[in-house]
């Protein structure tokens, strides 16, 4: 079963959820604010994704900006970045769609079509 990790108030997440439902794709929904991804989950997903770790950060979020992460991330180790992501779900780019062998970060419809349809 796919895991759909989202922030319910986020319009992009709502759009992605609507897309999944419209395409009859079964998923388990999880609120990123209520149940933040753990360090173990993030480490696993990062490994599966093949993406740079920076892609997992919600760079347009208020918390990201208030912590000055744009300037701090380049000097941080992967472990420090993963720990930071695990500390607050609002730092994590969403939605995340997690399958057994893939992780989709954010909602880009073409990527989702290529992977799921």
Image (cartoon, rainbow, N blue to C red):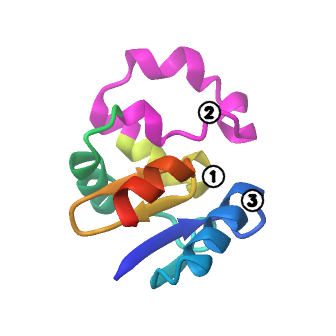
Q: Position of residue 107 (x, y in %)?
A: 57, 52
Q: Secondary structure at mark 2?
A: loop
State the CA–CA distance, disc 1 to disc 3: 11 Å
Residue on which the image places disc 3: 10
- Residue beneath label 1, please? 90
Which range is magenta? 53-81
Residue at left 63%, top 52%?
90
Residue 86 appears in the rendering? no
From what the image shows, is residue 98 above or below residue 27?
above
Using a 10 Å C-alpha cutoff, classify the residue at mark 1 as few (fewer than 14 neighbours), some (14 to 19) or many (20 or more). many
Looking at the image, residue 21 sits to the left or right of residue 24; the answer is right
Report crowding for label 2: few under 14, some 14 to 19, many 20 or more residues within 10 A (C-alpha). some
Check if mark 2's residue and mark 3's residue have beta carbons within 8 Å.
no
Task: Tell me: 69 left or right of 43.
Answer: right
Percent from the top left, x then y, of residue 19? 61, 69
Residue 47 inside the magenta-drawn segment: no
Residue visible at 67% across and 73% down in the picture: 18
Judge left or right: residue 93 versus residue 75.
Answer: right
Q: Which residue is mark 2?
A: 59
Depth-wise, is mark 2 or mark 3 nearer the camera? Answer: 3
């Amino acid at each position: 079963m796919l895991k759909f990790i989202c922030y319910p108030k986020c319009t992009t997440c709502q759009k992605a959820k609507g897309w999944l439902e419209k395409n009859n794709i079964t998923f388990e929904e999880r609120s990123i604010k209520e149940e933040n991804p753990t360090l173990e989950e993030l480490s696993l997903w990062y490994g599966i994704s093949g993406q740079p770790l920076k892609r997992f950060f919600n760079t347009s979020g208020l918390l990201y900006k208030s912590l000055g992460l744009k300037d701090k991330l380049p000097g941080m180790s992967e472990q420090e970045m993963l720990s930071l992501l695990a500390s607050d779900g609002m730092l994590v780019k969403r939605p995340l769609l997690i399958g057994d062998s893939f992780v989709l970060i954010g909602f880009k419809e073409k990527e989702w079509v290529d992977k799921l349809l």
